Image: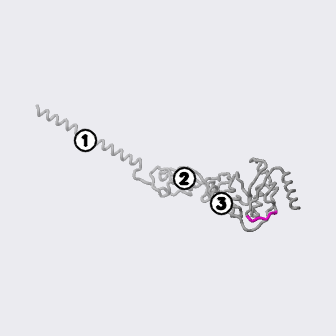
Amino acid sequence: MEKAKKNHTTSLWKVILINFLIAAAVAFVLLAILLIGLRQYTQHGVEITVPEITELYLEEARIILESEGLHIEVIDSTYSTKVPQGTIVEQTPLAGSKVKHGRTIYVIQNAQMRRPVVLPELRDMSLRQAKATLSSLGLVIDSIAYEPSAYRDIVLDIRMGDSIINAGTRVSEGSPVLLIVGKGQGTEEVTIPTVVGKSLDDARSWLLSHTLTVGIVQYDIPPTEENKLHYIVYSQEPASGTVVVEGTSVNLKLSMDIEKTVTADNEQDEEEFF
């Protein structure tokens, strides 16, 4: 009786052990399948070398990347004259980098068209600051011309071709500009020309052509953006005919009142007569 009971207990433990081993084997197999599946899904250990896609058009780059199991996303645009419009100028990660399957490659595309930018006030700004400002706007300094002035390395004028461009002018990104920069006063003597009756821009150009610069500018009535171009010079100091050294500044007074210009001309004629 006791022997039969003992045999029954032993058989029960064998059954439990066998079931446990079977359950453990099944769990092991399932875990192995899961790990293999995850490895395949995540491409564990598989790396892709990022191809070079700069200077390619967006659709060309997309085809190449997708053939490698990679994606592409444009995150910004810029304007460059170094590569054709519409092509890629930068990529992240860089070509040659190792990435996983499915990685997104971020690119900066060269704009199809030049965007317009507003030129800020650069006159009386230091050359270094002007360079940084123009660079941030995507404008290119084509050349720098130095003229005598009261101060060194101060921007006197901005030109595009043969035309003066003023603050507020809209120009295309990437456009080349010419900076007229002061080199300090010279040693040669020049005679100040008359600029009475001229607009501020014309007076500035005329004085620069005589190696002189504009100094303090005063308006009899504060101008607005709408009427600022209608003001003309009615007084200058030093007066025309004065002999000064190169780079001397000429202070100007402006008004929209033509009578002031006539009066100033008459007063100057009387002074020259006496």
Residue at disc 3, secondary structure: strand
Query: Residue 159 bears which disc, if any?
Result: none
Q: Residue furthest front?
A: 274
Q: CA distance from mark 2 to mark 3?
A: 27 Å
Q: Is residue 274 shown left or right of residue 254? A: right
Residue under pointer 3: 141
- Give whichever of discs 2 and 1 has the lower sequence position: 1
Residue 117 percent location from the top left of the image: 66, 52
Q: Is residue 245 above or below residue 80?
A: below
Which residue reaches farthest top? 1
What numbered label is drawn on residue 107?
2
Q: Quadrant of residue 4?
A: top left
User: Range of the magenta residues?
Assistant: 241-246
| Amino acid marked by disc 3 | Ile
Above or below, 18 against 245 in this view is above
N-term-proximal mark, 2 vs 3: 2
| Between 24 and 154, the one nearer to me in the picture | 154
Nearer to the camera, 81 or 192: 192
Mark count: 3
Q: Is residue 260 left or right of residue 119?
A: right
